[in-house]
């Protein structure tokens, strides 16, 4: 009871500027107006079509039953089945899940994927669970959302604190419930269960494609460039790997436990080998100095990459940022007041809904392969990912020039324009709402 009260107070003090759903609604409204569209389009876009809240009882190792809360939001399925990751995090809340599902719709629209936006989450700190408790939670969550998911309805994937292992438990549970093997019901699976080659690396690889293109726009030589990354999970570590391969000097990486800094560049392959052994680099890696998140944001680097959670670039952190490019590998890392400061400083922002769209792109390829039951070579997947990311980047740059606006507004407008075409084709809108 005491804990419930505390959670309630915490969610009540989330300001408008920190609530990702309020932020995304404001951005949708602004972009609809900038496109000269009727505000009815905003009303069609602002709410997820379907939101599901579930309780997930888990018998803990000490015999107690803990009842976790989970969500699944399906924003819009006019382009295809909804699709999006599942997050396990103590800060998960309904508004965050709704916002993440809107962003998924926009990403698919920008990249021109036949998918809608979905997202799921469970309020839990997975670090406090044993492996058995985590497995039961994963299985029971997927069981609880079974009525609304499936390869033609809504297709989950990994997000913060979920990974191929968790996806393996979830697909096993779903297959057992349905009584047959349905590999296309989720993506980001282990390869042996129908996962796609290249999916684990896809988001980071896509982030790096967009950074490479941004460097071309700004005339930055990647071989001379420096970078710092917040978050060294799936997305952050893969971004580091591919940037390093392009010759970028990565001077700092941080995460929830701290961070490390090396002025003449971290040895990324060595660091990856260290973390792959399950080591905590923030406290145990001896070949670099400690650094915290705040200090990392203020480093004089060319490229800054938030690859962790929302609301990191704020009115407190943005004034100290010296980077030329902010590549939003995470979803929603920048608050509106942080954004204003970035604009005043002339920092080139690669917005999240473009920057990290490589994940859903290869998830789409995985789903296609599952549906065909025929699997592609990794080179083919990476090449198609590159084509899709470049086409998305081009469209956003073109819109930015046409409308003389920020990259974020341009990305929203590209996504919304595509969704409006689908609404029109379905007869959802009349003359007054059209472009
Ligand atoms: P992950 O769980 O693998 O890694 C998350 C990282 O963020 C960890 O290093 C963690 O320590 C760090 N972190 C968490 N809270 C933090 C905090 N308060 N301060 C600093 N660091 C913190 O998750 P991921 O899959 O790498 O996802 C990272 C981001 O990328 C999320 O915003 C996610 O929505 C987004 N994203 C992920 C994918 C994907 O394919 N996994 C695709 C698109 C977007």
Image (cartoon, grey):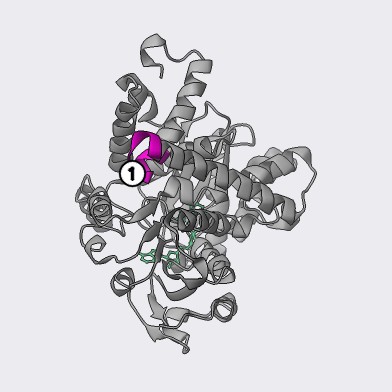
Please tell me whether residue 9 belongs to the stretch shown in magenta: no
**Residue at screen point 36% across, 54% down:** 348
In the image, farthest residue toward the bottom: 286
**Residue 163 x/y as whole percent:** 57, 59
**Residue 267 x/y as whole percent:** 53, 81
Looking at the rendering, in which quadrant would you find the C terminus? top left
**Residue at screen point 57% across, 58% down:** 205
Q: Check the image and report above or below for 128 versus 326.
A: below
Residues 130 and 223: in front is 223
What residue is disc 1 on? 406
Residues 344 and 164: in front is 344
Main secondary-structure element of the magenta-colored stretch: helix
**Residue at screen point 59% across, 77% down:** 269
Instruction: Write the start and end of the magenta stretch as one range.
Output: 401-412
Looking at the rendering, in which quadrant would you find the N terminus? bottom left
Q: What element carries label 1?
A: loop
């Amino acid at each position: 009871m005491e804990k419930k009260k505390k959670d309630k107070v915490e969610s009540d003090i989330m300001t408008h500027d920190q609530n990702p759903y309020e932020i995304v609604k404001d951005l949708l409204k602004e972009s609809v107006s900038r496109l000269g569209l009727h505000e009815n389009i905003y009303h069609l876009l602002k709410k997820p079509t379907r939101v599901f809240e579930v309780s997930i009882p888990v018998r803990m190792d000490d015999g107690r039953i803990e009842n976790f809360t989970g969500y699944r939001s399906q924003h819009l399925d006019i382009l295809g089945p909804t699709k999006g990751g599942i997050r396990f995090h103590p800060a998960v809340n309904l508004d965050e899940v709704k916002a993440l599902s809107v962003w998924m719709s926009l990403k698919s629209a920008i990249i021109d994927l036949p998918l809608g936006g979905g997202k799921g989450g469970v309020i839990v700190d997975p670090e406090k669970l044993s492996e058995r408790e985590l497995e039961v939670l994963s299985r029971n969550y997927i069981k609880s959302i079974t009525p609304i998911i499936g390869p033609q309805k809504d297709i989950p994937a990994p997000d913060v604190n979920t990974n191929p292992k968790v996806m393996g438990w979830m697909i096993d549970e779903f297959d057992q419930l349905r009584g047959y093997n349905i590999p296309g019901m989720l993506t980001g699976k282990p390869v042996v269960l129908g996962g796609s080659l290249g999916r684990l690396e896809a988001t980071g690889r896509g982030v790096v494609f967009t950074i490479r293109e941004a460097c071309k726009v700004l005339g930055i030589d990647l071989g001379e460039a420096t970078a710092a990354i917040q978050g060294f999970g799936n997305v952050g570590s893969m971004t580091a790997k591919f940037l390093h391969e392009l010759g970028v000097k990565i001077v700092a990486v941080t995460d929830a436990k701290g961070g490390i800094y090396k002025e003449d560049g971290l040895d990324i392959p060595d660091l990856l080998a260290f973390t792959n052994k399950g080591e905590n680099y923030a406290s145990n890696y001896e070949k670099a100095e400690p650094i915290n998140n705040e200090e990392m944001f203020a480093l004089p680097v060319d490229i800054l990459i938030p690859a962790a959670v929302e609301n990191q670039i704020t009115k407190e952190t943005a004034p100290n940022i010296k980077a030329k490019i902010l590549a939003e590998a995470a979803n929603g890392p920048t608050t509106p007041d942080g954004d204003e400061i970035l604009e005043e400083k002339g920092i080139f922002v690669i917005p999240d809904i473009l920057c990290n769209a490589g994940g859903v792109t290869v998830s789409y390829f995985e789903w296609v392969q599952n549906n065909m039951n025929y699997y592609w070579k990794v080179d083919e997947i990476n090449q198609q990912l590159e084509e899709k990311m470049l086409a998305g980047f081009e469209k956003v740059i073109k819109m930015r020039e046409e409308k003389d606006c920020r990259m974020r507004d341009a990305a929203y407008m590209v996504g919304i324009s595509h969704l409006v075409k689908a609404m029109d084709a379905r007869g959802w809108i009349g003359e007054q709402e059209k472009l």
